[in-house]
Amino acid sequence: MKKILLFTFAAFFTVAHLAAQPNCNCGSIKFLVGQWKCQGKNASGFPVYSGVLNVGNGPDCTFKLLNIMQQVGGDVTLAPLVVPPNTVVNVPITFTDHPPFIAAGTTAHFILEFMRGDKKCKIEIQSAKFPACGDLACKCNTAGWGTFIASIKKQSIKVKCGHQFSLTCADTVSLKGLYKCIGKCEATYTAVLKNTATGVVVQNFSPFSFTWNYKFAAPGTYSLEITPTCGDTKCTPCRFFFTVRNCDTACDCNPDGWSKLEFTTSAGVQTLKCGDKLAVKKAVAARLNGKYTCKGSCAVKYTAVLINNATGAIIQNYPAFNFPYSYNFPAAGDYRLQITPICGNKKCQPCTIFFSAQ
């Protein structure tokens, strides 16, 4: 039977009479279900109504309300409500309709269960008419956050808001989740990553999106707070916590720092290594690409110099050199490009590429 949720109550009274049942009616118990207002449709597309259960009791009875159910659906257990003599209560209720839906402008029948002494009693009553009920406006959902999938070192686990992760600077954490708004709308997100020890914001994410992938640059304790927005309303954020250890933060040269170099011309791409010699055509553009990786959590910088091999003359200085590097050799001759990586304040092993321009 269809579900009815009952909440707190206040004094009010409208009248409906209980059909006679042996030992159930002492002539003074009265009920009415009505005052329906549409609250829109839930995420499943089912109409949701707020209403009122009016309960009146005269001087001769004490009874306990047990359940209220809609005639064609399932029942719902409510916290038992004792109604003493000479009591009038007005109980707000929420009713979620299920197929087949109640047509607008029609009534529905409900069944009430209550105890009078040791006798379990039932009464069927007709409610007030139901209004038309459309979609819910986009709004926050108290159960909007579900289960997340987190991955570290290619191992995936299911987590919920508040989870504490333990990882190293070598690990990339991946987090996938979803917040479900009420209504026909999708949540948008912002997020902030903070150092919890200092309170310093490490990074703002506006907008934020799933899947989130991140690699921490330094050890410490961190929090990620993700705030969903439904329509124009910011909803309850979800927080995750990270303890990051075993990070090499010293910036230093790396004996294996040079990755593969690539030389591109109109003829194609050639892979090379430091010390190789390339044949190029004068006045024809050629491009050199590569990368040096320092030890520790720091970014490399470069300087470079282009030298005429035969004369030793400096053709061009590059105090701030960047990849990719392009150059048109204006004249035939032999040249060398010496690229020096810098890690922190240390100049590291340079890489020299030789060119023969024809």
Image (cartoon, rainbow, N blue to C red):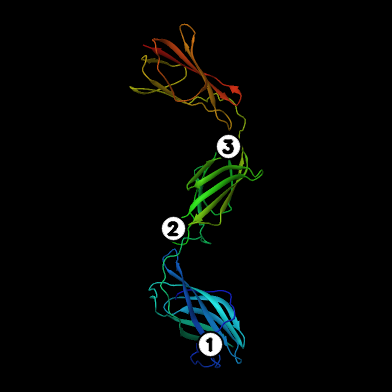
Q: Where residue 6 sits: x, y (%)?
A: 54, 75
Q: Which residue matches tag 1?
A: 30
* On-image quarter of the C terminus: top left
* On-image quarter of the N terminus: bottom left
Is label 3 in a helix, a strand or a loop? Answer: loop
Q: Is residue 177 visible?
A: no
Disc nearer the start of the sequence (3/2):
2
Q: Where residue 240 sits: x, y (%)?
A: 58, 50
Residue in the picture at 56% in, 53% down: 238
Q: Single out the mark in the foreground, 1 or 3.
A: 1
Q: Where residue 177 sits: x, y (%)?
A: 49, 52
Mark 1 closeness class: few <14, some 14–19, many ≥20 residues within 10 Å: some
Q: CA distance from mark 1 to mark 3?
A: 70 Å
Q: CA distance from mark 3 to mark 2?
A: 36 Å
Is label 2 in a helix, a strand or a loop? Answer: loop
**Image vertical order of residue 201 relative to residue 180, above or below:** above
Q: Which residue matches tag 2?
A: 185
Residue 23, quarter of picture: bottom right
Mark 3 closeness class: few <14, some 14–19, many ≥20 residues within 10 Å: some
Residue 255, quarter of picture: top right
Q: Residue furthest front?
A: 232
Q: Which residue matches tag 3?
A: 217
Disc nearer the start of the sequence (1/3):
1
Is label 1 in a helix, a strand or a loop? Answer: strand
Task: Residue type at mark 2: give it.
Answer: Cys
Q: CA distance from mark 1 to mark 2?
A: 42 Å
Task: Residue type at mark 1: give it.
Answer: Lys
**Image vertical order of residue 87 relative to residue 243, above or below:** below
Task: Residue type at mark 3: give it.
Answer: Ala
Given residues 9 and 99, the one toward you in this image is 9
